Amino acid sequence: MSTLKKEPDDSIGCPWLDPGPHGNKLKLEDYPSALLMRVANRIQADVTSVYARQHELSVPEWRLLARLHESAPMQLTALCRTSYFDKAYAGRILRDLEARGLAHTQADAAHRRRLIVDITPEGRALARKVVTVARRSQARLLDVLTRTERAALYETLHKLLNATSAAAPEETS
């Protein structure tokens, strides 16, 4: 039996259908960025942090460990870019992961100033355990959406991601 929901009707009042000139009809809680942050924060608090904590990881530690599990070894700059962390923050998290024996860093032999980050066998074993739980939890999130809603949300989120630089406010002096 499918857990997918039926297609919703169009009776839900959507403030995005008519945001007004320059968005002047939008309330703060209806800003797309505010709603996306609320959803992301709720998922992190109610889903991601639960399975991370169950394995004695913070959410940032889990994010880096998961990326390393999928892509290591890799340059620190690539890890930061794909994990959306700045180098200083990633460095602090990596120090904790290194202290626990889950990751290690070393200077790139070809470019001494470049840092290579790798996952240890212990880190890979832990990541494998967490990935199983994470995938199951993420799939449950998708269960509330119809197939059409899933496809539309995926496409829409990528469209917004690609449009963010174009929507950035103009600098004022």
Image (cartoon, grey):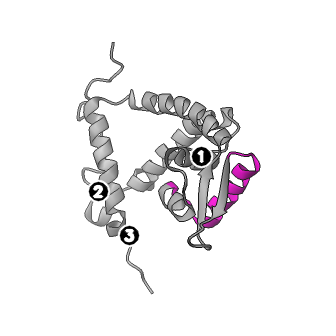
Residue 168, numbered label: 3
Q: Which amino acid does label 1 sit on?
A: Leu
Q: Which of 104 and 62 is in front in this view?
A: 104
Q: Quadrant of the N terminus?
A: top left
| Precedes in sequence: disc 2 or disc 3 | 2
Q: Which amino acid does label 3 sit on?
A: Ala
Q: Is residue 128 above or below residue 62?
A: above
| Precedes in sequence: disc 1 or disc 2 | 2
| Residue at the top extreme of this rendering | 1
Distance between mark 1 and mark 3 Cα atoms: 31 Å
| Residue at the front extreme of this rendering | 109
Q: Nearer the viewer, residue 68 or 144?
A: 68
The structure residue drawn at horizontal position 76% and vertical position 50%, both measured from the top left corner, is 99
Confirm whether the magenta stretch covers residue 75.
no
Q: How crowded is mark 3: few (under 14 residues within 10 Å), some or many (20 or more)?
A: few
Give the magenta part as a residue range: 83-102
In this view, the mark in front (1 or 3): 1
Distance between mark 1 and mark 2 Cα atoms: 40 Å
Q: Measuring from the top left, give residue 38's x and y in whole percent.
A: 49, 46
Could you say whether the residue bearing mark 3 is in a helix, strand or loop? loop
Residue 172, numbered label: none
Confirm whether the magenta stretch covers residue 84.
yes
Q: Measuring from the top left, give residue 116's x and y in whole percent.
A: 59, 61
The residue that label 2 is drawn on is: 19
